[in-house]
Image (cartoon, grey):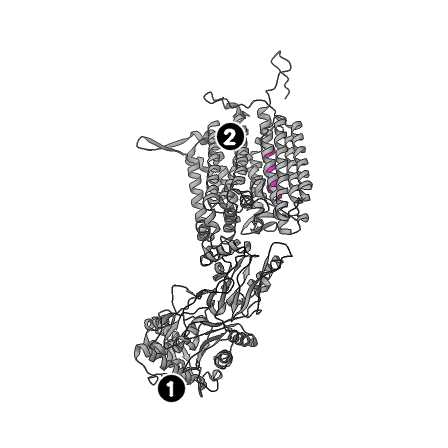
Amino acid sequence: MNTPIRRLAVFSMILFGALMLQTTWIQGFQAESIREDPLNNRQYSERLSEQRGPIQVAGEPVAYSEDVSEEDDQARYQRMYNGGTLYTPMVGSFRSYGASGVEEAENSLLDGSDDRLAARNLRDILTGHDPGGARVELTLDPEVQQAGYEGLANGGKNGAAVALDPSTGAILAGVSYPSYDANDVVSIDEPQAAVDNYVELEQDGDKPLLNRALNERYPPGSTFKVVTAAAAIEHLEATPDSTMDAPDTLDLGRPLPNATPGGTCNNGDPDTLEHSIQISCNTSMANWAIEVGGNRLSEQATDFGFNREETLKTPLEVTPSLAPAEEDPNILGRSGIGQGNVEATPLQMAMVSAGIANSGDVMKPYVVDRIQEPNGESTLSSTDPQTYTTATSASTAQSLTDMMVLVTGQGGSGTNAAISGMDVAGKTGTAETGGEQGTHNWFIGFAPADDPEIAVAVVIEHGGGSGNENAAPIARQMMEAVVQE
Amino acid sequence: MSTAATEAPASSEAPTDLPPVKRRNAELALICVTIVITMSAIAVAGLNLNGQLPGAMWGYGLLFGAMALATHLALRWIAPYADPLILPCALFLNGIGVAMIWRLDAADSGEIEHAGIGMQLVWTAVGMILCIALLFFLKEPRILQRYTYISALVAIVLIALPMLPVIGISEYGARRWIGLAGFTVQPSEFAKIVLVIFLSSYLVTKRQVLSLAAKEIKIGRFKIMDLPRARDFMPMVVGWVMAIGLLVVTKDLGSSLLLFGTFLAMLYVATQRSSWVIIGLSVFVLAAALAFQLFWHFEQRVNIWFNAFDREVYDAVGGSAQLVQGQIGMAYGGLFGTGLGGGGAHNIFAADSDFIMASLAEELGLTGLMAILVVVFLLVQRGMRIALASRELFIKMLASGLSFVVCFQVFVVLGGLLRLIPLTGMTTPFLAAGGSALMASWLMIGLLLRMSDNARRPAPKAIQDEGATQVIRR
């Protein structure tokens, strides 16, 4: 029996040999690449108490590092945030187990490890200064952000609001409600409390950690009708006066009613495109979508920024919005009014609005305006506005603008967004959510209609009312913050 | 011992007897080294954690040292010829484990002076007492051979206990515990010892028929392997059914793999027929894969194994997060480690039990892990040496079986952490926190020490030399 025992001993030696080889491979050869893996969140906890550059809004820091060490001790920096819950969805937080928002997206610049800061750091080390991180200046407009946040907070319902500068793509506001105070989750002196607070937020059913403005998709409802109208004008050479059958109910597998007053668009007669947008007629717009066809409707949405495989980075990553090409006319009809399989982020709908405002060119949205050297003396880089996609021709954009102005005017569906003394373009949306909970309430628009300075999108989750009732007032306040200065 | 008597000494083999040398003083010296290592390990951890020599270095360190020395003294008295390397190896692993668990607890509780490893030391003491008691009461391990079917029954009961409704406890996706009077016990830790005892006595009686009756499979003139007769498959089928049954009911791939692997190794030792191993291994792998396909997310298991660093796999519920965190820890450890207390091992889930090897790898580095592996390897090889030196077949089987259990258990645990094989939850002998595992480990050490004592003791001397009847004293 000794031979098999010897062989078993040799076999156990082989097992140990395999373990030793693999350990050597992982701890010796693979160690560096494992440490650099993005899943390694220790890179945050290790650098938690190091100095980071500030994140600024309108020249004022909203995130900055403060030395909290005792005198003569080694410096320990605590990350502090201004503005409470207001900016957190965009600015993010820098915690022991990870980071979010701009804190994560511009991490290497903020902590000073970016190559663009290498020369600067070397100079600092040679001259005996503390090398610090770069300053990151955001495009956010405090007043617009505040207006959006207050509007949502006063309503008390979950939701999001986005404002863009249509001519550049600069994000003027990125509001997500509810939010959280980043100071609660970053304490270096009470790390356990910070982690506990974060876990509590993670488990909160209202998802305060989610940036709804960029990373939550909703059915856009009737706000998507402007995309359908754009497709009709671009592909079918329709004009605002072109008419389309607008029965009081349309049979799309299940009957599709109108949500207009009295349930009718034009007493059952064919309705003009202009009037259909003004009062948000369902049946005519569903017919327009079927007329345009699934491929072309989906292509038009793609031209506005939907259906992109490459993730849009602002530099915060944006969840792609969807408008698939439908073949079944019943589903296609519903797609035409922003139901069915159409889903959009609030940012995407703001891009639709901004594209129309900017003569059909959708500018690439961005939130980092410029990067400045640690001392703030000189600018390392600044974001150049660029066209993200061309959605429509200038004339189509003009027609859409004209129709959208009617929405906020007399007899329109979005009168609550009207601002006295100027024309405001808009479109309301009330999206069915399928469940027991109430509808999502939308408003997209821009002002002034003739020379747009701001484009917005507002969504109230399960608001249960209409877009005009719940979303339009918030959109108006955000637009007023820019146009009434 | 009729079977033992039939085994004629194989003349072709080299002599395997061990010299009857006690070398207890060498053992004492080695034990003193392990005590110093344990105390320094606690000291280093304390210095790294808050810059002060921890009181635990003296408190826990000396307590552990006293227990170690007591065991050594007991050995001088009860088993003076026992192998002098086995106890120091076990104590080294136990001591390093205690130091690591103290360090993890100190980081978790924040208050370094309140870090408690009391229970781990209590279990160590209980384990040592069990070991000594076993040495004292079990003078001839071969009497265990009488209890073939009783031990089979006990093994089955122990394995089945966690499946029982009231006392069985399912945690972290596996059913491996039972609750008893406020304690949780992991019966599979003891089951593996009883199973080795059963297999040793069963296979010793059945080995002839299992190894001799066979069909040769040839391709042309070349013999590929010996295929056993169909009716001799019965033990294999029973072992296989039990292993797969265990897997299906408890979801505990680790224990299932360990028990079945041990079964195959011992079958091989008994029959010297590799066909058994090949057949057994293939049907086990096939059945395990099928079971996972049928019952759980086999794909996720495989994904965790192959694509652990994939973001989606990492974020999934029950995904690869723990494994990846362990590997990141090891990566931070690098060649020389972060030093005890210098790393972030305490942030990993189960850092002191299933993941203690990852914690050690991080803080002691590749060098320290190698040292630990060498010590475990030494322990295993001493066990194998005892098997070679023993004369009775049952003892040979028992010693080699127990040694292989230690070896294979370390392989399953560390192999999982290193992504050599799929990760399964299991304790590491001597190192991991947990009473059942420690007691079972010390019982195995007790058996090995007893067998080595018997194997090395000088042959009994006749005290009178006339006549056919002799009075023998051992």
The kind of residue tagged 1 is Gly
* Residue A6 at x, y percent in the picture: 48, 29
* Mark 2 nearby-residue class (10 Å; few <14, some 14–19, many ≥20): some
> Horizontally, is B240 left or right of B466 in the view?
left
Disc number lying in front (2 or 1): 1
Q: Give the vertical position of A303 relative to B257 (above or below).
A: below
Q: Who is closer to the viewer here, B25 or A364?
A: A364
Report if residue B458 lies within the magenta region. no
Q: Read off the magenta span.
A: B423-446
Residue B205 is labelled as: 2
Question: From where the camera sits, is residue A246 visible?
Answer: no
What residue is shown with label 1? A268
Report if residue B430 lies within the magenta region. yes
Q: Which residue extends farthest front?
A: A127
Q: Give the vertical position of A102 relative to B39 (above or below).
A: below
Q: Chain of mark 2?
A: B
Instruction: Look at 38% across and 83% down and name the residue there.
Output: A402
Which SS class for mark 2? helix
Q: Chain of mark 1?
A: A
Q: Give the vertical position of B17 relative to B107 (above or below).
A: above
